[in-house]
């Protein structure tokens, strides 16, 4: 007699190790500038919620709420110098997020691609993986440590290095649309899209270098609205949230 398949428990995560990509502007709240403590603590609560499911979480955070290298370059700062300034901004954000997570009872480690031993560990892949195995959230700061690369590229790189199962790109919109939903009310949201379709239709998922890195290594990407309560947990549980980009 065939055995009856039982449904997986509702709290069973779809992913066990994830990389969460946060923009710097997200830490700035509605204004998108500076550090808004309430916004940072809201983020920490969502991360703590998925840690309770036993999911291993690494975070790459941007620095656009403080400084962007491209904007500095446009104002006369040498591009490489501007990019290094932007990397330092990501360290500030990483420390703010680490503090908020620790206050939620979530142990963290900040690893920086630019050595600064008094505030962060150096990025060492094996050590980062060990932290995850011990239940710590690892926050990667300072991008790749090199100018001319975005934090999107850092996220794609680190996700592949630590063998994450998916890149979760946190945004203010609920997925990828065929047109700008703010300008076109009839814009259509994709539930799933392939890398090739995203390239052909010029859908803005990540910058070109980051997208190519994910495509080459068949790393799935989920673009979702991080500002809707419990949305991160919903993505982790496999609910139909946001847009999934797949090979």
Image (tube, rainbow, N blue to C red):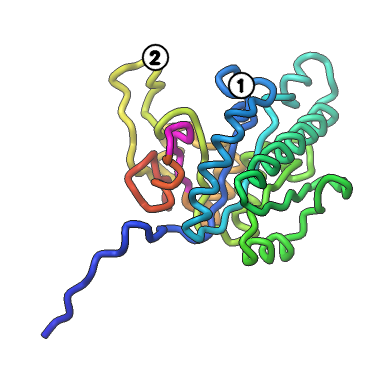
Q: Residue at x 54, y 50 (%)?
A: 214
Q: Is residue 130 left or right of residue 8?
A: right
Residue at disc 2, secondary structure: loop
Tag nearer the camera, 1 or 2: 1
Q: Residues within 10 Å of mark 2 (few under 14, many from 20)?
A: few
Which of 7/41 is in front? 41
Most extreme residue toward the bottom, as rendered?
A: 1
Q: Is residue 220 left or right of residue 138?
A: left
Q: Start and end of the magenta stretch?
A: 221-229
Image coords of residue 150 (percent x, y): 67, 36
* Image vertical order of residue 126 relative to residue 84, above or below: below
Label tally: 2
**In the drawing, what numbered circle is on residue 166?**
none
Residue positioned 60% across, 53% down in the render: 159
Check the image and report above or below for 123 versus 126. above
Question: Horizontally, is 183 left or right of 128 in the view?
Answer: left
Q: Please, is residue 134 above or below residue 221 in the view? A: below
- Describe the element under mark 1 as helix, strand or loop: loop
Image x and y of residue 171, in percent: 50, 32
Residue 203: quadrant of the picture: top left
Residue 116 lies, in percent from the top left, at 87, 46
Q: Residue at x 54, y 48 (%)?
A: 48
Q: Nearer the viewer, residue 149 or 8?
A: 8
Crowding near the residue tagged with mark 1, few <14, some 14–19, many ≥20 C-alpha atoms within 10 Å: some
Q: Is residue 168 magenta?
A: no
Q: In x, y percent, where is residue 143?
A: 72, 42
Residue at 38% across, 23% down = 179
Residue on which the image places disc 1: 32
Badge 1 or badge 2: first in the primary sequence: 1
Image quarter in which the N terminus is found: bottom left
The answer to which image quadrant residue 198 occupies is top left
Which label sits on residue 183?
2
């Amino acid at each position: 007699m065939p055995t009856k398949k039982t449904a997986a428990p509702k709290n069973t995560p779809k992913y066990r190790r994830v990389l969460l990509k946060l923009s710097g502007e997200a830490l700035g709240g509605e204004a998108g500038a500076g550090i808004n403590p309430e916004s940072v603590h809201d983020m920490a609560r969502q991360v703590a919620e998925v840690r309770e499911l036993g999911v291993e979480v690494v975070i790459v955070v941007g620095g656009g709420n403080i400084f962007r290298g491209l904007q500095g370059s446009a104002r006369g700062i040498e591009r490489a110098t501007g990019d290094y300034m932007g990397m330092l901004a990501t360290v500030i954000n990483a420390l703010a997020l680490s503090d908020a997570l620790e206050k939620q009872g979530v142990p963290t480690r900040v690893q920086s691609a630019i050595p600064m031993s008094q505030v962060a560990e150096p990025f060492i892949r094996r050590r980062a993986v060990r932290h995850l195995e011990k239940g710590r959230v690892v926050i990667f700061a300072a991008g790749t440590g090199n100018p001319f690369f975005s934090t999107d590229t850092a996220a794609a790189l680190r996700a592949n290095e630590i063998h994450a199962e998916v890149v979760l790109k946190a945004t203010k919109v609920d997925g990828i649309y065929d047109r700008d939903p703010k300008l076109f009310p009839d814009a259509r949201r994709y539930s799933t899209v392939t890398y090739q379709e995203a390239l052909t239709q010029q859908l803005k998922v990540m910058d070109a270098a980051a997208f190519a890195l994910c495509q080459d290594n068949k790393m799935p990407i989920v673009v979702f609205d991080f500002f809707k309560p419990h949305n991160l947990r919903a993505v982790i549980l496999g609910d139909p949230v946001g847009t999934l980009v797949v090979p």
